[in-house]
Amino acid sequence: MADDDRFDLGIDVVPADKVDVYYGFLDTISAEQ
């Protein structure tokens, strides 16, 4: 169960950060076109 807890934490923390950066990147691309 400890492994599952660590996995959930990683999923909650890392992707949320990357999604934010990803959409910021898309906004930049759209503004340039």
Image (cartoon, rainbow, N blue to C red):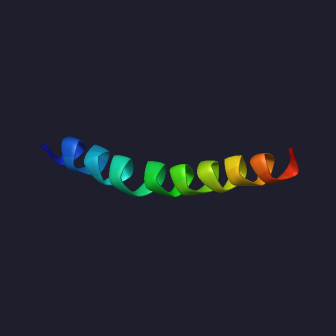
Residue 18 position, x and y percent, is 55, 51
**Residue in view at x 69 percent, y 47 percent:** 26
Left or right relative to 25: residue 18:
left
Residue 7 position, x and y percent, is 30, 44
**Which quadrant: the C terminus?**
top right
Left or right relative to 12: residue 19:
right
Left or right relative to 3: residue 12:
right
Residue 19 position, x and y percent, is 52, 49
Between 26 and 21, which is closer to the camera in this rendering? Answer: 26
Residue 16 position, x and y percent, is 45, 54
**Residue in view at x 18 percent, y 48 percent:** 2
**Residue with the most extreme left position:** 1
**Residue in view at x 34 percent, y 53 percent:** 12
Q: How many marks on residues?
A: 0
**Which quadrant: the N terminus?**
top left
**Residue in view at x 60 percent, y 51 percent:** 23
Quadrant of the image occupied by residue 4: top left
